[in-house]
Amino acid sequence: MAFKPQPMSSTRFDEITALCKRRGFVFQSSEIYGGLGATYDYGPLGVELKRNVREQWWRDMVYANKNIEGIDAAILMHPKVWKASGHVDAFHDPLIDDKASKRRYRADQLIEQHIDRLRSKGKTERADTVQKRFTEALNAEDMPKALHSLILSEEIRGPDSGAFDWTDVRQFNMMFETKVGALAGEDSSIYLRPETAQGIFVNFQNVLATSRVQIPFGIAQIGKAFRNEIVARQFIFRMREFEQMEMQYFVQPGTQLEAYELWRSRRWDWHVRNGIPASKLRWHVHEKPAHYADAAVDIQYEFPIGWQEIEGIHSRTDYDLSRHQEYSGKKMQIFDQASGSRFIPYVVETSAGLDRTVLMLLCEAYRKDVVEGRSRTVMAFAPSVAPIKVGVFPLLRKDGMPERARAITDALRCEWNVFYDEKGSIGKRYRRMDEAGAPLCITIDRDTLEGEGVTVRNRDTLEQVRVADDQVPAFVSDAMRGAA
RNA sequence: GCGGGAAUAGCUCAAUCGGUAGAGCGUCAGCUUCCCAAGCUGAAGGUCGCGGGUUCGAUUCCCGUUUCCCGCUCCA
């Protein structure tokens, strides 16, 4: 996965994060205690935005496809899951820093290179000795320390600096560990899942047996995942606790690339439908897919901080199911009646970051423009994801306008998230709703009391139209579905 | 994780050469105004990021720590 930070042009990104806090989209976690790194909370507007994204995804992935079912697996899973998936090995790297060059290396790889060098110089005996000590160190109780002393005693130097100025070897475990009291065995440590996909794979047979789906079919899930990032920065783009929207699509071996192409375009279109212009999206093809994949591509969005991945579409082969079959001893096969054969399905994965999608929508929606010489800040959300759908105001706080406005608010409240406001000048109230991203504002004026209907103000065009009272719900409905 | 910078009201910032802090905006209460914020009045809100040290006294000086920003580094 390529992560190339671009030079920050980022007053704009800062402005967006500031607005998020000011208006209640996103707060830093545990702020009153000084904050917890790379962890954020969603405020009243943020939670609505996030819920809307989640619902749009579920609608498009689960309801819109008769062969896709949803699940909601636990965050805690049996430790063997992560052995089977390869995460235990892949997430435990012993790392060491060269203080001179400020570069970081895998400690085990430094030693392996050292051994290779000895061999190529013909110092076979010496290489064997080091190899033996290396193997011992890897199995040592304090493996990082053992590797460290081996690097020191062999006087292995920094490959880039030639210096001999190392930090300690530290093990960066990307998975969060926690304890389960009742778990049998020598170790009660278990992990908070680093991805939601495995919850789908381990339930593959359960879903197959209970939901009458037939291959090809998909299992969808939205849920939290946890990664102990070494460097976690850039607001909610990279968090230690984050939420994924994943769908694993199970297909006949040999048809995976067809499914891969299908989901590539489906996922791209979904982002466009949420209001992201295609010009701000691009494909990023993995030249060297991960060990389990035969094809992999990311959808990237052009954030103010540069092009960054928001979703991956990966053809994962039968790697995961095969591994679970091997580690669990349970069959992960499907019986094909037509041919009478059994096979382990291939899997095409769509894996989108929910928080990243939210951040993308925030960045895309944010704009400043000028209305009659006055600047305004607008969150131009698509109606489908806007946290507040309609603001309702009495033009004046008298003559029965507030009562009338409240009645209209209550009528809309059961279907839409509406916001009633009678404070301050009408212009100020419009601007407040602009910052919250409400697509429509309804204003009750004297003519409304005379039976002339209400005015509906469009956030983006600032146009106002008069709508009869009894037509308001239908008008709002149409607007929210994009008809207006 | 390393190096550099920063941290004062919700936000943007000021002041105190060491003697417990102000403004604008925002928020709240009211007034005014029939349609695009910065009209009027009033109020709330800060142990000056946190902990320790020096001092009669620390927001100010020193040390540590946390968080944020920038650069590097890492990432299935």
Image: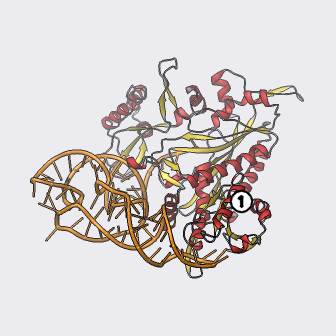
Tell me the subunit letter for badge 1.
A
How has the structure been colored for display?
secondary structure
In terms of secondary structure, where does tag 1 sit? helix
Q: Residue at left 67%, top 20%?
A: A329
- Does residue B8 sit above or below A199 in this rendering? below
- How busy is the neighbourhood of tag 1: few (under 14 within 10 Å), some, or many (20 plus)? some
Q: Mark 1 is on which residue type?
A: Val
**Quadrant hosting residue A209:** top right
Q: Residue at left 81%, top 38%?
A: A216
Residue lying farthest to the right in this orientation: A338
Residue A258 is situated, as x and y percent measured from the top left of the image, at 79, 46
Residue B46 is situated, as x and y percent measured from the top left of the image, at 33, 56
Numbered label tally: 1
Residue lying farthest to the bottom in this orientation: A373
**Quadrant hosting residue A363:** bottom right
Horizontal side of A26 relative to A122 (left or right) equals: right
Seen from the viewer's position, the closer of residues B41 and A355 is: B41
Residue A299 is situated, as x and y percent measured from the top left of the image, at 65, 54
Residue lying farthest to the front in this orientation: A399
Is residue A355 among the parts visible in the rendering? yes
- Does residue A273 sit above or below A131 in this rendering? below
Horizontal side of B15 relative to A458 (left or right) equals: left
Is residue A158 among the parts visible in the rendering? no
Q: Residue at left 35%, top 41%?
A: A156
- Does residue A348 sit above or below A42 in this rendering? above
Residue to which mark 1 is pinned:
A272
Residue A237 is situated, as x and y percent measured from the top left of the image, at 54, 53
- Does residue A480 sit above or below A65 in this rendering? below
On-image quarter of the C terminus of chain A? bottom right
Seen from the viewer's position, the closer of residues A253 and A395 is: A395
Seen from the viewer's position, the closer of residues A325 and A231 is: A231
